[in-house]
């Protein structure tokens, strides 16, 4: 019997890729190293393993993990390294949240109508 896996949610795919970026930014080669440097739960980090992702992780947990890393980065990295590391963390956070908060077709239609009203003087 063949098992069918459901595709991962877009925000989770973004989080998995994002944590790979974070690993590189922190100079870590494994999730275990990030666990030690970032004081994150190894069991939770394993859920973001690209080889074996666990869809039970919540968006709130991922956001909290990134927030913790932002605070830890201030303590671990030199002043000259902090902008690079914080930029990576902020970028990953923004992409994960944006992927989680997709606009509906109705939202897009309302936004386009609002844009038309706001900027009608520019389209004349």
Image (cartoon, helix red, strand yellow):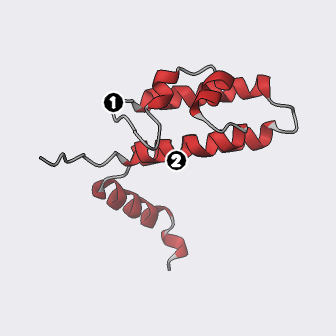
* Residue 17 numbered mark, or none: 2
Q: Where does the image place residue 32, in percent across and percent down from the top left? A: 59, 28
Q: Is residue 124 above or below residue 99?
A: below
Q: Is residue 70 above or below residue 81?
A: above
Assess disc 1: are there few (<14), some (14-19) or many (≥20) residues with their C-alpha within 10 Å of its C-alpha: few
Residue at point 36%, 59% (across, down): 108
Residue tagged 1: 56
Tell me if 107 is positioned left or right of 82 in this view.
left
**Marks 2 and 1, how far apart at CA:** 17 Å
Q: Residue furthest bottom?
A: 124
Q: Where does the image place residue 42, in percent across and percent down from the top left? A: 52, 23
Splitting the image into 4 quarters, where does residue 24 fall?
A: top right
Asked which secondary structure carries label 1, the reply is: loop
Query: Can I make out residue 86 in this image?
Result: no
Residue at point 42%, 33% (across, down): 59
Q: Where does the image place residue 28, in percent across and percent down from the top left? A: 68, 36
Q: Earlier in the sequence, mark 2 or mark 1?
A: 2
Residue at point 79%, 36% (across, down): 82
Tell me if 56 is positioned left or right of 30 in this view.
left
């Amino acid at each position: 019997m063949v098992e069918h896996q459901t595709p991962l949610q877009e925000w989770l795919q973004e989080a998995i890729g994002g944590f790979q970026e974070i690993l590189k930014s922190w100079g870590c080669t494994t999730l275990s190293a990030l666990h030690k440097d970032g004081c994150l739960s190894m069991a939770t980090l394993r859920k973001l393993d690209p080889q074996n992702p666990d869809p039970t992780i919540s968006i709130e947990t991922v956001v909290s993990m990134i927030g913790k890393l932002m605070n830890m980065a201030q303590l671990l990295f030199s002043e000259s390294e902090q902008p690079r590391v914080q930029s990576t963390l902020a970028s990953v956070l923004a992409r994960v949240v944006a992927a989680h908060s997709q606009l509906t077709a109705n939202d897009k239609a309302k936004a386009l109508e609002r844009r038309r009203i706001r900027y009608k003087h520019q389209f004349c």
